Every structure is written in structure tokens, then in C-alpha cells.
Amino acid sequence: MESSPAISVSNSLAGRLPGVVIIQTSGEPGNDQSNISIRGTNTLGNNQPLIVIDGIPDRDGGIGRLNPDDIANISVLKDASAAIYGARAANGAIIVTTKQGNAGKPVITYKGDFGITRPTKVPEMSNAVEYLTIMNELAIYNSNIPVSEWGAANTAFQNAGSYTIPGSGETVNAAFSPETVNGHRAGNDPWLYPDSDWFGATFQDWAEQQRHNLSISGGSENIKYYSSLGYADQGAIYKNSANRYQQYNFRINTDAKINDYFSTKLGFTYRKEYRTFPTEGAGAIFRMLMRGRPNEAAVWPNGLPGPDIENGQQPVVVTTNATGYDKQPTDYLQFTGSVDIKNPWVEGLTLTLLAGVDQSQQRRKLWQTPWELYFLDRERYISTGEPVLNAAVRSNFTDPRLTQSSLNVINTNLTALLNYDKTFGNDHTINVLAGVTRENFQGEFLSAFRRNFLSAAVDQLGVGGEVGQETDGFGYNRTRLGYYGRAQYNFKEKYLAEFIWRYDGSYIFPGNDRFGFFPGFLAGWNINNEDWFNVKGIDYLKLRASYGQMGNDQVFFNQALQEYAYLSIYDFGQYPIDGVVQTTLTEPLLANPSFTWERANNFNLGLDGIILDGNLSFTFEYFLNKRDQILIQQTGSTPGSSGIADLLPPVNAGKVDNEGFEFALNYYGGDPDGLKWDAGINGGFAKNTVVFLDEIPGAPEYQLQEGKPIGAYLVYQYDGVFRDEAAIASNTLDYSAVKPQLEPGDMKFKDVNNDGIINDLDQVRIDNNLIPTFNFGATLNASYKNFDLSILFQGATGAKLPIQTESGDIGNFLKYSFDNRWSPDNPSSVHPRLASRGDTYYSEGIMVIIPTICLVKIILD
């Protein structure tokens, strides 16, 4: 972990732990943390695992921004062992332990690293000539020119810039004249004929990042301490970027032995996360980068920014501070304290009292100012040769405006544990634990907005105008209570058995259904400790199995956590009545007075071993997770005409199965006094199947989500392209439901139900979604004296990522689309005609699966 260059700890986990799925969907500094799941997707709602840091579950801020130099150990609970955490442990648990001090003289350590990052891949877009060529072809397809004359019209467009239709006498003009196309092709006049690379104009080649950490540890046998001070700085790939992430963190952990019966641990952490962003989101910026037309200037030859793509959106400008700023500082204060009290009269009996308090404040100040872009006086330039640029405000507002908000959070965790550990004779060891935990999560949010500032020089809320001002606010108070226990038995380190139970209550559920009981059973057999086992070369061999039930109270649908769904509650809103804006009440959800925990039933079988004189270790695991009582809305069986389809409450009806395997192999070699090295590979396969989901009655079986992975795509199946009119004439399928008249270059679909008609009944549910089914990693570590080397290969496969562009008169095309398209000059039976704004039946937002495409990603840290 410490050697990983990633700023976010979540990204450093990729490829290192079998069964842990890491998906990083953004590289934006401050927002680049990964989504973590354990053993793929197990439920229809929230799949995030429970994060436990120093014994406290669900700490504010999570794992992503922990200082990696403070982490002593990370372990993953994937089987029934997670049942001890009951509430929210249905998706597994990641246990993080931070460093403690060691007895001895103070040890001071400084670590600094500097790095550079760049995108692994940037979309390759069509250049100006290619884009104009496509647009001229589209002008032919969307005109009255008969199909039989498309080739002649294309030639006429290239030579004369227009085509007269024989018979009707109608003249159709090219979208771009030959002079314009040739001007862009020559590239001699960037004022009139630019060839813009919008990504190149907006991105720099590299972004810099750095981390520094200073730590001190030491102490005596009775008092030990560890303390660290860290700083991280991560820049973005935008030129003159407004995007940056900075982090300052401080930690001090102490543990003290007061006497033989009383000891304590205290931990304090402060972390400041300082994010700055452009006033436009990364999604909007990248959308415009993809749409940027190459025949328009991104940057004029004199360095000034060119026209906007739409509504003032110009990536070269909106990625900088020229449009204002978006500052988002967050402060975390976290305290952890524990006391261990040993009973002097009962050997092995210990009482542990544990408390965790997290306080955070997240602030945001979004200051938006109008911005100017520059437009060429084309007529003057053509007549005089003098380039004159005229500035114009192109933002969709002309007055500065300010939004400020603050979210204050305080979370508390109070835990009491009673533990009894005793060995009888030399053969029998038992451990019994009982505990209770109370968690409380409180937060308050407040925001204010003002516009009509007299000047962009003063960015204070009180200076804004009163007209159009807005305020907003909300609060929450969430509580959980859990009782739990564990009983372990160990016979001569041969036979191991464990029973875990948890009785949890959550505020999410109504009173009569609030608590759930979740047991777990684990058994292990250390085969190598058997008297009869004497196999040369096998140093350790353990077989283990487990079954456990765990609960999940995260009722997620409609992109939100559904709280108090057992009550008839109302949302506040506003609506004009008789010309006056009035406060309104609306019912967001119908109440369900009886629903309870989603329940996970997890089976696991594993084999661990060490062979070859301790040089090779291995782990193999098989698992089957059966999830039931999943909280879903019954939207499928509720008619839309009922008027309540979007108001349905959660019910315990969904079912999902998830099955797979994992493995890990590690080899340790080299000379302890010279070159030391180790290498490892790991992987995990997981595939889920929806057993029950309330679906539309009467839908064909091949379109159902049931029997397929969660989120499986519903697609048409590609079957080639109509190359010419002869291919259309020989077609026997009825396409009238999707297009009145077929034309060359149109895509063929498979007639799945064999009714001779192509329509929505020919869509099929495939086995693919966005989540990879197989994740793998390979590591190599080597050290010699004061030099060390760490290499990580990690990758994933089994997912399909849909790619969609906004192309045509609205934006540019991918270079791949230009190179692989049907055209009058290059008819194809494989690649279809291109379209503008989805104006064909195969490009209007539907999904088409092409069997020959496979996406695999491997990256090297």
C-alpha cells in the first residue's frame, strides 16, 4: 500500500486482494476514488461493503482518503465471518487497522514521492476534413435525392458543391463547399480553416502529484505512541486547471498499560481535504470535448479562446478559473478510545469499552462569473487579411452569482464487549464474546444563493441582490442498535469451530420489524496437524467452510436511500397559486407498514496451504451467496395507469444468487542477505443471477431480467448491413415498425421471435453488464540492500461498456466511425451509415450488440 502511487487508498487495492472488485469511474482529482464491492454484485440496491476502521464501522469519510502511511493492515471479510458486523455486512466488510507505536527509542521517518500522471487513452476524434466529409454525406441521405443517385450526388458534392435531381430539377447543396473542404485539407489558414483537436487544446501532457509524510513512533513497555503528519497534492490534466486536490492529515495513536488489569488506547485524527473544481462539472466538460467540431477554432492562432460549442460551453475556458471557482473544503475530526479491564478473579475475562466520535464539516463556495469568448470577423478578414476578434459574453447568465453551503456531521459509536478466553489443559481452547453497539448519525445541511452582484470583484454573500435569492436546508438523525456474540472452540489447532450471532435494529424499518437475527457458522480443519499427516513438502494445509446470514438495511432505489418508508410523510416544495409562490406538500412515497431486513445467506468453502519449504502459499475458495427479502418496488406488476407507479413503497420480494471462485498464489524467493523477491497472482470470478424481480407481466422470457445478471443489457442483435438496393430487395423481414423504407447502409437486426417482423419484441437480454465478472492481479516485489522495486499488473474482463456519442450537426464523430462507415464511395455489408442526432432507428438511443467486440483493460502501476 505504501509503495502505491495512487492518492486514493481505494485505487491502491485494485489487483491486490482476490474477490475485491475495484472500479474507478473518474480520474478527476478529489473525485477519483473507486467504487468497491466484494465478490461482484450481490443485490439489486447498494452493494458497498462495510468499512471498519480501528474497530469503528462506517467511519465518516470512509477508506478512500486515509493516509496510506498510517495503515498497518487491511483485511477483507467475505464469508460468514462478516456476520459479527451484522448490520450492513451483507456485502462483506473491509477491516482497516492503523499503526501503533513500538517500545524503544523514537524512530523518525520521512517519506516523499513525486509523480506524473496522464490519461491511458484519449478518444480519437475525426479531423476537420473527415467531419466535413461525413456531414456532406448526411446532407445526401436526408434529402430528396433518390437512393440510386447517391453516388452521383456524392461526386457532385465533392466537385461542384451541389447536385440537381434529374426529373424534379431540385438542387441540393452540400453542407460544406469544396472550397471549404479543400481549405481545411490544406491547413494553410488556421483563421478561416482550423483543424481543432479539442482534447489537445484542453489537456496538458502530464499532471503532477506529490505526497509527503513525517512520522515518529516509540515508547516504553507501558506507554507507546505513533504520530504522523502528511500532505498530498494532486493536479489535473487541464491546461491552466481550476481542478486540484490537496490533503493535510495528522494522526496520533497511543496505548498505555496502567497496570496488569487496566490498559487503554486513544487515537485522534484530523484531516483537511481541499478540493477546487471548475464551475462546470467533469461530465459536462467531457461531453463538450467529445462534441467539439474540428472545423471550429478551439483556440485562435493568437491564443485567445474560440467560440462555444453550446450555451457558452467552451472546454478550453470552463476548465480554468476564468468562469469563477468551486471550492469545497472538508474538515474531519475523529476520536477513538478504548479501555480494557481484566478481571483479577476470573482468568481470561476482559471487559472492553470502545467509543468513536466523528465530526466533519463540508463547505462549498461556488462563485460563477460571466465569461467572454472570441469570434472572428470573417468578412473583414477575407477582404483585408487582418484577423479581428470580437469578444462577446457567452455564458448563459450576465451577472455574477454565488452559492454557499455547509454540511455538519457528527457520528458516535458506543460499544461494550465482554470476552472470555480460556485454555483447558493443552488441548481445548474456548473463546466467548458478547457485545452491544449503539450507532448514531446526525447531520445538518444549509445552503444559500444570491445573484445580481454589482461586481465580480467581491464574492461575499451579503453583497448579492435580494431578487432571486434562495435558501435551503435539511437535517437527519439515524440510529442503529446491535447485540452480538461469538463462541469459538479450538482442539489442538486441528479442529476449529465458531458460532457467530447478531441481533440488529435499524431506524429504517417499522417498529415491529426493526430487529433481525443473523447467525453464522464456521469450521476449520488443519490437516497438517493430524498425527497421520506426514507429506513431505506440505508445511501447512487447512480446509474451511462457513455459512452465515447477514443483514442489509440500505433501501436504495430512485437514486436515493428510502428512509421512513413505513410512514406517510410529505416533501416540501413550491408552486405558483394565483400568481403567488406558495409552499406545497407532496407525498413522495406510499407507506408500507411492514417490511424488514434484506437477508444474505452466504456459503463458503476454502483451502489454504503452504508448500515447498514455506516458499509457496496458495488459497482457493468457492462461494455461493443467496440474497432474499431484497427491498424493491413492485413496478412491473403495477399498471402505469394506476398513477402510483413512481410512488410504490419497498417490499421484501427480490432474490439474487451470486456464485464464483477465488484464488491466490504467492512465491517467496531470493537470499535473505542479498536479493529478496516475491511474486504473486490472484483472481476472482463472480457472476450473479436475478432469481426474482417484479417485471412486466407477459414479457417474452428472453427479455426478462430474471435468469440474467443484475443490470444486464436489453439489446437488438446485429446481423450485418444492407449493402445496396439488391440486398434490400432480397430482404424478407418487415422493418416497417422501425423504418418505413429501408435504404442502403441501414443495419440488419435478427428476428429473434421468428415472426418475420423487426420490432421491440426482437430485443434480447444478454449476460453482460458494466461489472466485470473476472478480476485479476499480478505482483512482483524485489529488494536489494537500500533499493526496492514493486510492480503491479491488474485487470478485469467480462464487462461490456456501451459507448455513445452526440454526433452530426450537434458534434463530432469518433475517428473509428469515419474509418468504419458505409458510404456511397465505400458500400459495406459490415459497417452501417452514420447518422446525425440519432436520426436512424439503430442510433436513437437503443443498444445493439455486435458479437465481435470485447473490451479488456490492463494497467501497470
Image (spheres, rainbow, N blue to C red):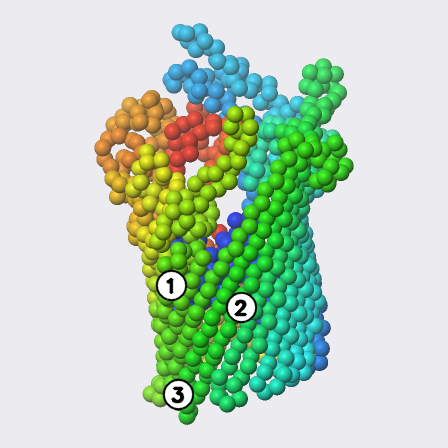
Nearest to viewer (mark 3 / mark 2): 2
Give the residue at x 61% y 75%.
265
Give the residue at x 38% y 29%.
841
Image coords of residue 227 (percent x, y)? 68, 70
Relative to 440, is 394 on the left or the right?
Answer: right
Furthest toward the bottom, the residue is: 425
Residue type pointed to by label 2: Leu
Considering the numbered disc 3 on the image, is that residue within a helix, a strand or a loop?
Answer: strand
Residue type pointed to by label 1: Gly
Give the residue at x 60% y 71%.
337
Which residue is label 1 attached to? 516
User: How far apart are the alpha carbons under marks 3 and 2?
Assistant: 33 Å
In the figure, 191 relative to 56: above or below? above
Image coords of residue 407 (percent x, y)? 61, 50
* Front position in the image: 526 or 328: 328
In the figure, 29 relative to 95: above or below? above
Which residue is label 2 attached to? 414
Q: Quadrant of residue 588?
A: top left
Nearest to viewer (mark 3 / mark 1): 1
- Would you say the residues marked 3 and 2 are in contact, meaning their CB atoms lie under 8 Å apart? no
Which residue is label 3 attached to? 428
> On residue 4, which mark appears?
none
Considering the numbered disc 1 on the image, is that residue within a helix, a strand or a loop?
Answer: strand
Neighbours of disc 2 within 10 Å: few (<14), some (14-19), many (20+): some
Q: Quadrant of residue 595?
A: bottom left
* Front position in the image: 111 or 105: 105
Neighbours of disc 1 within 10 Å: few (<14), some (14-19), many (20+): many
User: Image quadrant for the C terminus?
Assistant: bottom right
